[in-house]
Image (tube, rainbow, N blue to C red):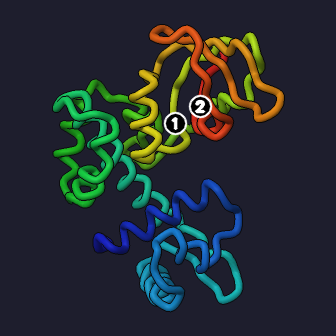
Amino acid sequence: MPTQTKENYLKALFFLDHKHDNITVTDLSKSMQVSTPTVNNMVKKLQSGGWVKYEKYKPLKLTAKGRKVAALIIRKHRLTEMFLVEKMGFGWEEVHDIAEEIEHVNSEQLFDRMDEMLGFPKADPHGSPIPDKSGHMLEPDYIKLSAAKAGTKARLRALDDSSMELLLYLNKKELELGMLLEIREIEPYDQSMTIGYPKHNNTILTREVCDKLLVEVV
């Protein structure tokens, strides 16, 4: 099994792979917030463990083994977040740092029990998909709220950013996953949206916020 540090690198590579076709050492350095030489040293260790493919001047690639390890870490993280919210009453803005610690616990039985107690959820409290026990993860076909047109009704399904700042902002707006949103107006100048939903009839959201809300048009 990889060490906790190696797991963090593999997880970072997994997320980078969803954003870039060609992951560089510099990309990984920025993601991990460490120096390039430190990343180079770790990449060599990951390569020797069979988790990463690396050739000089070529993109970094997770191997099938590395991808599965990364997906299972993400599975543990997202199951933990869901358990903390659903069974322990934590707010969705409180769970990330706790899950960062628990995701490294090496006990398949613990996370299988969590999964069972939660009723085998498909997504975490922020709407992000939970990989299955084989490391497979289905990516839902949601669109950004900012891509929807005026007059559209859409259900809020997930967040493209689960930062503390955004979650606290959504708490203030009383916006929750599963809510039906109606786009009443789009401001031509800055693309801000006026939306209605169960707790608020007319709320203005900036383009920046709308870019981070993932919806399913109904």
Say above or below: 162 vs 105: above
Q: Secondary structure at mark 2?
A: strand
Disc 2: CA contacts within 10 A as few (<14), some (14-19) or many (>=20)? many
Relative depth, front residue between 26 and 13: 26
Say above or below: 120 vs 6: above
Residue 202 got which mark?
Answer: none
Looking at the image, is mark 2 or mark 1 earlier in the sequence? 1
Q: Which quarter of the figure has residue 172?
A: top left
Q: Identify the residue at horizontal 61%, vertical 28% (top origin).
A: 205
Q: Identify the residue at horizontal 49%, vertical 85% (top origin).
A: 35
Q: Residue flagged by tag 1: what amino acid is it?
A: Leu
Q: Residue flagged by tag 2: what amino acid is it?
A: Leu
Say above or below: 16 vs 136: below
Q: Identify the residue at horizontal 42%, vertical 85% (top origin).
A: 45
Relative depth, front residue between 203 and 143: 203
Q: Identify the residue at horizontal 58%, vertical 61% (top origin).
A: 16
Image spot of residue 130 (x, y percent)? 42, 40
Q: Which residue is mark 2?
A: 214
Q: Which residue is mark 1?
A: 159
Image-based side of 76 in relation to 53, left or right: left
Say above or below: 134 vs 175: below
